[in-house]
Each structure stands twice: as structure tokens, then as C-alpha cells.
Image: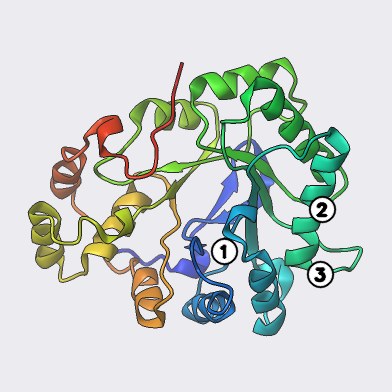
Amino acid sequence: MSTTTILNDLLPLPSHPSVTIPRLGLGVYKSPTTQCEKTCLAGLRAGYRHIDTAQFYANEAEVGQAVRNSGLPRESLFLTTKIMAPAGSPEATYEKLLESVKKIGGEGEDAYVDLFLIHSSKSGKDGRKELWQALERLMEAGKTRSIGVSNFGVGHIEEMKQYAKVWPPHVNQIELHPWCQQKVIDAYCKEHGIVVEAYAPLVRNYKANEPTLVGIAEKYGKSTAQILIRFALQKGWVPLPKSDNPDRIQANADVYGFVISDEDMAVLNALDRGDEGAIVQAVQNE
């Protein structure tokens, strides 16, 4: 049995070890502005110390408000956000980053986020370069503690060597679950010391009645969501399950009292359908 808990399951970023990331995060994609603060507070009460938002989610301010109302020390939390595309010029892009920092951290000079990601690889080579250089500037200014990417394949990360002062990126956040394991980019990131974060680890509940998953959940006396989160942790990923339901938020954090056997991990591994298993997107590795 595992004696680890959500509060002490921490991972130093291999390429930036002064920063430690909690290995289970709370995602707030599609958490509406009327709900998001309540969701974050429920997560913090359940033991989460890692919250993942984005400009695209339009709820950064609510995440920040939850943090300020939680009573928890800011340094005990790990807050992530993302930028989708350049804003038209290097300066405008940088200002767009600062807007997020202010929404989450407040107007004070000491406001910061813990991780800022490029949300998509779809801006083209010049756009990716502008975004990364803006993130490097933000990190130099002390407004983010670490920087990374999302939905980047091997080619995108290799391309960064041409212009990046910070390489490798500290994190790559991609879709990961038993049906979409993205083995090429997962292995590449692990080889290069890039933390792999798993979005949509619960497959947005589309697989809740899948017989193989249900059978394993029944064997361990756990929910299918708990099995999927535990699977992600044992794969060495940082899963970001999302829910606005306080009971499910609590249950999704209760994944440290059991270990999936090697035999059952092999069964779950065999569900992989490659790119076809993605419900959002699989990365392009060329």
C-alpha cells in the first residue's frame, strides 16, 4: 500500500530543480466564472495544491480570488496558466502574459505564477518563437517560476533549440490516458528531463462504462476515475483531473491508498489506440 499523500507527492522539475511541482493537479477547463472559485476552494480543502488554468478558460481571476480567500500561504501553492497565441508584437505578447499574472496574483509587485505554458503549437514557427521569448522574459522578471509548453511534439521542442535561452522547456502538457498514451513524445520528454502533464486523464468521462476499466475498478473497490488517475501517476505523469463537483474533487484526490499491480497496468496499457484514441488532440512529432 502507498503511504504517500497528495500533500507530499512532489516532483522537482528535472531541468529546473529549484521548483517543485505537486504531482496531482486540479484542472478548471470549462469551470464557469460563477463556479470556478468554489471549485478551487473545494480542491484546496481536499488537499490539492496545484491548480491549472489558462487564458482560454476565461477564469484566471476566479482562480486568483480563490487563492486569496483560501487562507493558505501563497508559497504552498502551484498555479499554472497558459497563453494560446501571440498578441501581434513581442511587447504586446509580453503584456498579455502580465495580464494573466495580475489576474491570478493580484496587482502587487510580488505577484507571480508558478508555471506559464504555451497552450498550443499552432502559431507557426515565428509565433512559437515570439511566445517562448516572451515567457523567458517573464521568467527573468520573476513573474513566473517556470515555463513550458502544451500540445508540443518532438519536432516543436527540437525547433526551440534554435532560439531558446531556456531549454528544454520545464513541462509539456498533453492529452494522456489509457486510450491515448502518446508514447513517442512521452519517452522523448522523459529522456530530456521534461515533466509530462496529463490533461483529460479522465477522458471527460467518456470511458466510464468501458468494460475493462470497470472490471479493474471493481477489483480494487475504486471508481473508474480513481483508477485512471492512479494509472497516470504510475506512468510518471502529472494528471490534471477536472470536476466542479466537491465530492468528486475529494474522491479524485483519494488515490494514494492503493497501487495498481503490474499485471493490471499491462491490461490498461493494452488499451492504447495511439492518435485515434485522442478526444482532444494527439501531438504531431515530425
Residue closest to the far right: 109
Looking at the rendered structure, the number of numbered marks drawn on it comes to 3
Q: x, y percentage for residue 125?
A: 65, 21
Type of the residue with mark 3: Gly
Which dot, 2 or 1, sits closer to the camera? 2
Classed neighbour count for the residue bearing mark 1: other residues with Cα under 10 Å, few (<14), some (14–19), many (≥20): many
Q: Name the residue under label 1.
A: 51
**Residue at 70%, 28% in the rendered image:** 127
CB under 8 Å between callouts 3 and 1? no
Q: x, y percentage for residue 3?
A: 37, 67
Left or right: 53, with 188 as reference point: right
Quarter of the image for residue 99 reads: bottom right
Above or below for 241 versus 87: below
* SS for callout 1: strand
Type of the residue with mark 2: Leu
Instruction: Quote the CA–CA distance across marks 3 and 2.
Output: 11 Å
Q: Is residue 112 among the parts visible in the rendering?
A: no
- Colour mapping: rainbow
Classed neighbour count for the residue bearing mark 3: other residues with Cα under 10 Å, few (<14), some (14–19), many (≥20): some
Q: x, y percentage for residue 10?
A: 53, 57
**Residue at 57%, 68% in the rendered image:** 49
* SS for callout 3: loop
Left or right: 92, with 215 as reference point: right
Instruction: Quote the CA–CA distance across marks 3 and 1.
Output: 16 Å
The numbered mark at residue 98 is 2
Q: Pick whichever of labels 2 and 1 is earlier in the sequence.
A: 1
Q: Mark 3 points at which residue?
A: 106
* SS for callout 2: helix
CB under 8 Å between callouts 2 and 1? no
Work out whether residue 253 or residue 281 is closer to the camera in this orientation and state it: 281
Q: x, y percentage for residue 108?
A: 89, 68
